[in-house]
Image (tube, grey):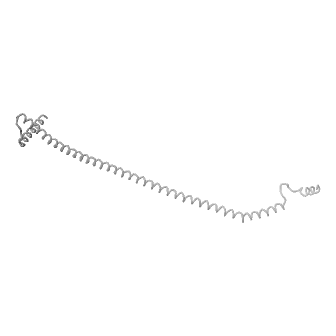
């Protein structure tokens, strides 16, 4: 083995240890050219098609996202318009209800005033009827008392109804006139 090392050392004495042998450079260049051609013809086109497919997918997703965003904005605008319309309609309904409530209150007040007037009129009519009844009853009672009193003062009976009635009416008229004068 020592001989082989010496032979190699003698042959390579004029060679640079940093620079490889010519056959290494040639075979390395051949292998590099084969790898380069294989890479250029096989791997690079496949990688290019894969990158193109990814770019198209990304562009497609961006287009879909833009379309979805446009649809979302359109839906938002539609929703906003519907919301504004609903608010306006709710305002109109509230105003209509307020007007209806005012009409109902006005009608109820009018009905109450009408009912009050009817009840007052009926009560006044009833009071007037009772007053007339009381006046008739009082006239009769006062008349009979006055006739009895006059009969006992005069000492004779007053049986003539027309005279007694005229006397009672005159007495009551004088009494009413004196009451009116006193007021």
Q: Residue furthest right?
A: 3
Is 36 situated left or right of 95 in this image? right
Task: Give the percent coordinates (x, y) of residue 24.
Answer: 83, 60
The residue positioned 16% from the left and 43% from the top of the image is: 133
Q: Quadrant of the C terminus?
A: top left
The residue positioned 62% from the left and 61% from the top of the image is: 57
In the image, 159 versus 52, the foreground residue is: 159
In the image, 111 versus 105, the foreground residue is: 111
Among the 4 quarters of the image, the one containing residue 1: bottom right
Is 5 situated left or right of 115 in this image? right
Q: Count up the numbered dots.
A: 0
Task: Give the percent coordinates (x, y) of residue 146.
Answer: 10, 37
Is 24 situated left or right of 114 in this image? right
Is 53 situated left or right of 133 in this image? right
Among the 4 quarters of the image, the one containing residue 6: bottom right
In the image, 37 versus 158, the foreground residue is: 158
Task: Give the percent coordinates (x, y) of residue 159.
Answer: 6, 41
The residue positioned 54% from the left and 58% from the top of the image is: 68
């Amino acid at each position: 083995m020592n001989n082989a090392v010496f032979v190699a050392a003698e042959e390579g004495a004029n060679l640079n240890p940093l620079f490889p042998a010519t056959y290494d450079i040639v075979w390395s260049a051949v292998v590099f050219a084969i790898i380069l051609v294989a890479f250029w013809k096989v791997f690079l086109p496949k990688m290019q098609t894969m990158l193109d497919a990814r770019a198209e997918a990304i562009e497609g997703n961006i287009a879909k996202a833009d379309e979805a965003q446009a649809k979302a904005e359109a839906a938002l605008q539609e929703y906003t318009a519907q919301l504004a319309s609903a608010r306006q309609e709710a305002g109109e309904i509230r105003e209509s209800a307020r007007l209806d409530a005012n009409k109902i209150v006005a009608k109820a007040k009018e009905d109450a005033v009408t009912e009050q007037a009817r009840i007052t009129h009926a009560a006044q009519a009833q009071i007037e009827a009772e007053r007339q009844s009381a006046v008739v009853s009082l006239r009769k009672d006062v008349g009979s008392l006055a006739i009895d009193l006059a009969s006992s003062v005069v000492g004779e009976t007053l049986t003539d109804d027309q005279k007694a009635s005229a006397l009672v009416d005159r007495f009551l008229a004088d009494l009413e006139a004196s009451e009116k004068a006193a007021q």
